[in-house]
Amino acid sequence: MKLSLDDRAPESIDNDCLVLGFAEGAELTSSARAVDEASGGAIARMLQSGDIETGIGKTHFLQNLAGLAASRVLAVGLGKLDKLNLPRLDRACLAAGKALRDHPLTRCHVCLHEMEFAGSDAGRRLRQTALAIHRANYLYTVTKPRKDDAPVPLQSASFQGGVPLQPALDQAVALALGFEKARMLGDLPPNICNPAYLAQEATAIASQYDNVELEILEESDMSELGMDALLGVSRGSANRARLIVLRYSGADAAQRPVALIGKGVTFDSGGLSLKSGENMMQMKYDMCGAAGVIGAFVACARMQLSINVICIVAAVENMPDGDAYRPGDVLTSMSGKTIEVLNTDAEGRLILCDALTYSERFEPEVVIDVATLTGACVVALGHHATGLISNDDELADELTSAGDAIVDRAWRLPLWEEYQSQLDSPFADMKNVGGMPAGVLTAGCFLSRFAEDLRWAHLDIAGSAWKWGSDNGATGRPVGLLTQFLLNRAG
Ligand code: BES
Ligand code: MN
Ligand code: ZN
C-alpha cells in the first residue's frame, strides 16, 4: 500500500473516499469546513441530526455529497476533544482503516491527523494516522490467497499536507514496512517459518542494503562457543537451530552499537514438559520477539539512521524427542554458569541467556532482548502493555517514553534482588523456573544473571505480540517502540 502527501484542496481530490475526523466539542477541521462549504452545509446538518457521530471510532460512509470530487466521505468519530490523545487517535484511525479495508474501495485521502489536541504536534499526528491506516489494511495471504468475496485492501492512501510533513510520512513508511515484516513472520505457520526460514529472511534483508552484514552460526559453531543452554533446547527438534546476526552500520565504526536480541522459538511445544493442546495452539507465535527485532531492524535500515545496530536472533524449535533435553538435566551455558532444567517449557530464557553472553563481543552500548517469555506476563499486564524489566533506570525510561510516543507501550516491572532466591538450585548455579509467584519477574531475574556487565533491558511481549481469540493474528509489536527508541538515539 502506497502512502503519500497531497496538499490540494480536499474537496478537489478525485478518488474513492475522503476521510474526515469529528470530535465532540471541537470546531470543524479545515478539511471538514471546506467539504461543508462545498456541499452547501451538508456536513453541519448531518452532525446536527446525528448522521455523523463523534463517538470514538464510529464510522459512517456518506454518499452523494454535492461539490466533491471524491466518490464518498468516511466520517470518523474522534470522541471528546478534551480527552483526545495519541492512543485515542490511534484507536480511531485503526477503526477508520478497518472500515476502509472492508469496503470495496482502493484509493483514499485521509485528513484525520488535522484535529489538534493538547500536547500534540502535526508530525506525530500524521505519522500515527498513516501507520494506523496501513496497519489496519494488513491482510495475511501467504497460505490463504485472497478470494473474490474477501475484503479489498487499499492500494494507496494520501494524507492532507505538504513538504513540512514529509519527514513524518517517511518515518511512517519505514515503520509500516517493519510492522508488516514482523506480522507476516509471526503469522506464518511453523512448518514454513522454522529456524532455516528466519535465516533465509535475514539473508534477503542483508542483500537489500549495502551497510547491512549478516553472519549465521550453525549448531557446530554454537557448540564450539559452548552455547549448551541454547543447544539443549534445540536437541529435540529435527529443525537445526541458527544464531542469526545482522549488523547495520549507520554511524562511525567507533560508535558502540545497540544490540537487539529476539527470541525465535519457531514452535514451542513445551518439549518433554509438553503443553496442553489448548496452550500449544498459539505457539507458532513464540518467535514474535525475533520478528519484532527484525522488523525494527528493517525500519532502521530503511531510514538509514545514524546509529549502529546489531540484531541477534536465537532461532530454535522446542520439541519432545528421544534425544530431547529433560527436566532434571543440568546445562552449562556459554557464560559458564550452570542451569538445572526443571521445566523444558521454560526454554526462552535458555536460548536468550546464551545470546546475551554472545552479544558481549560487540561491546554494545545497550542490549535489549525481546521475547514472548511468560504466560505470567499476560496475567499481569494483559494485552495492552509490554512488560519491561531492566538493570538500568535511564534505559528503562528511554524505552517507556519511546513506547508512549508511538502508542506501543511498555510498563516497567521490578527487578528486586529479593526475587532472585526463587531460582536457587541445590544442583546448579540456578534452576530455570522460579515457581508460581511472579513468574514474569523470576524470568527477568534469570536473564539478569547473564547481563551483569551490560546495560540491559528485557521486553516480555507474551501479551502484546499477537491478538488472541477470534481476531487472531500477529500485531507487529514492539516494532514501534524499538524503532522510536532507535530514532531517538540516532538524534
Ligand atoms: N512461550 C511461552 C510463554 C507464553 C505462554 C507466551 C503463553 C504467550 C502465551 C514460554 O516458553 C513458556 O512456556 N513459559 C512458561 C514458563 C513456566 C514453565 C515457568 C509459562 O509461562 O508457562
Ligand atoms: Mn515454553
Ligand atoms: Zn516459549
Image (cartoon, rainbow, N blue to C red):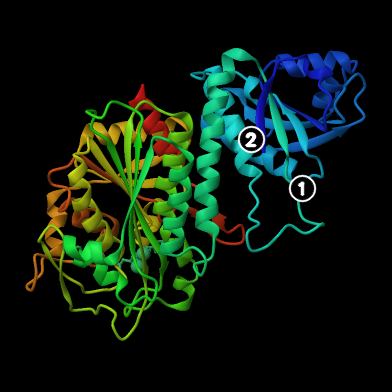
474 relative position to 333: left or right: right
385 relative position to 333: left or right: right
Give the mark toward the camera: 1 or 2.
Answer: 1
Element under disc 2: helix
**Residue named by callout 1:** 152
Which image quarter is the N terminus in? top right
Which image quarter is the C terminus in? top left
**Residue named by callout 2:** 93
> Which residue appears at 47% of the width and 37% of the height?
299
Q: Which mark is residue 469?
A: none
Element under disc 1: loop
Q: Position of residue 444 (x, y in %)?
A: 24, 53
> Which residue appears at 78% of the width and 14% of the height?
9
Amino acid type, label 1: Val
Q: Residues within 10 Å of mark 1 (few under 14, many from 20)?
A: some
Q: Is residue 313 visible to the viewer in this orientation of the structure?
A: yes
